[in-house]
Amino acid sequence: MHKLSVIVPCYNEQEVLMEFYGQVKDVLNSIDELDYELLFIDDGSKDETLNILRELAKEDKQVRYISFSRNFGKEAAMFAGLENASGDMAAVMDADLQHPPGTLIEMYKALNEEDFDMCATRRITRKGEPALRSFFARSFYKFINKMSDIEIVDGAQDFCMMKRPVIDSILLLKENNRFTKGIYGWIGFKKKWIEHENVERTLGETKWSFWGLMKYSLEGIVGFSTLPLMASSMFGIVFCFIAFLLIIFVCVKTIFFGEVVQGYPTLMCTISLIGGIILLSVGVLGQYIAKIYLEVKKRPIYLVREKK
Ligand code: UDP
Ligand code: MG
């Protein structure tokens, strides 16, 4: 008999939690010969989420929860879930019902009847999402896939189910700056993708701000590609070459034609262009150094306040 740990990161999800619990229980109970646990991760919620979880855990032996000392972010919550999962399989899903619980059945089949180690979902539409957000998301995926050797699938969601070897592999990656989509790509294994339409959130509201998403995408780029560093060096080489040609040109011109001081505007343009590129490169370097700084401190990914 298999045991499935369903990991649910929750941050201020009081409106949806009971509804989610009901729906997921129904689905899990309908799968034959399956033992399961629901592992909720309260990511420092400021509403009634923790109280609801305490109640659920009291009434239902299959419910466990971990409550963080503050908000550590969804990535940390997923990591905590995987670290504490006792099943030989684990599923990760959002509490907001944007991940249709019925899909768990299909995923379970892919893992047990077909030869897959991991089954994840990707949305093929972004219906209901603000147009600007879709545009940035699409561009991000195009950009990062050009820059990184690891494939990061557009529309891939954090909704997935995996077997024990995959869980253990993910747990080996202890980096603080976690970018799960990249991690999933990096670990390899046989994956099945289930495609579906975007489901809009009906209860509660999204925890992502535009700025939050921007920062998250930068994390992805810095975490899974060193190409920006390379690009700075390339810029450097190209401009050195141009400068070299310019020097020869100026010398030759002065020697043979006796040029007087001229060309103030060109000088200004060149100085500011090169200055800009230097600053940009230093900035890129800074991004990586900042990440190194955060990683070498080896701080824990999350802190637990209460668990059951
Ligand atoms: N979440 C979390 N910590 C956070 C932000 C979000 O655990 O700091 C959880 C949230 O409760 C939900 C899931 O992550 O279960 C996805 O969040 P949300 O629905 O806000 O994101 P979206 O679906 O808009 O990408
Ligand atoms: Mg959501």
Image (spheres, rainbow, N blue to C red):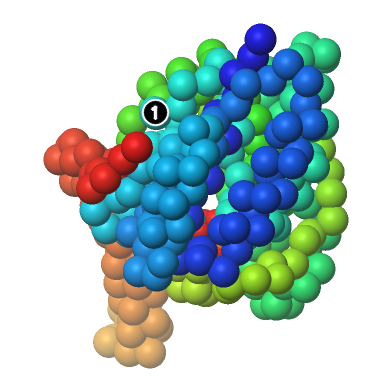
Q: Relative to residue 286, is residue 16 drawn left or right?
A: right
For the residue carrying disc 1, how many other residues have a C-alpha within 10 Å: few (<14), some (14-19), or many (20+)?
Answer: few
Q: Residue at x 27, y 58 (%)?
A: 70
Q: Relative to residue 300, is residue 93 drawn left or right?
A: right
Q: Residue at x 46, y 27 (%)?
A: 85
Q: Position of residue 95 (x, y in %)?
A: 58, 54
- In the displayed structure, 123 sits above or below 243; it is above
Q: Position of residue 123 (x, y in %)?
A: 78, 51
Pick out the residue farthest to the left: 297
**Which of the 4 image quadrants contains residue 162?**
top right
Q: Is residue 231 visible?
A: no
Q: Residue at x 70, y 57 (%)?
A: 98
> Closest to the observer: 33 or 145?
33
**Which of the 4 image quadrants contains residue 298?**
top left
Distance from mark 1 CB to nearest ligand 1 atom below 8 Å: no
> Closest to the observer: 242 or 250?
242
Q: Is residue 261 visible?
A: yes
Three-letter code for the amino acid on which mark 1 is drawn: Glu
> Closest to the observer: 182 or 167?
167
Q: Residue at x 76, y 38 (%)?
A: 27
Q: Position of residue 290 (x, y in %)?
A: 24, 52
Q: Quadrant of the N terminus?
A: top right
- In the displayed structure, 89 sits above or below 240; it is above
Q: Position of residue 181 (x, y in %)?
A: 57, 41
Q: Relative to residue 145, is residue 292 drawn left or right?
A: left
- In the displayed structure, 21 sits above or below 104; it is below
Q: Relative to residue 258, is residue 122 drawn left or right?
A: right
Q: Quadrant of the C terminus?
A: top left
> Closest to the observer: 125 or 99?
99
Instruction: State the residue position of label 1.
Output: 83
Q: Secondary structure at mark 1?
A: helix
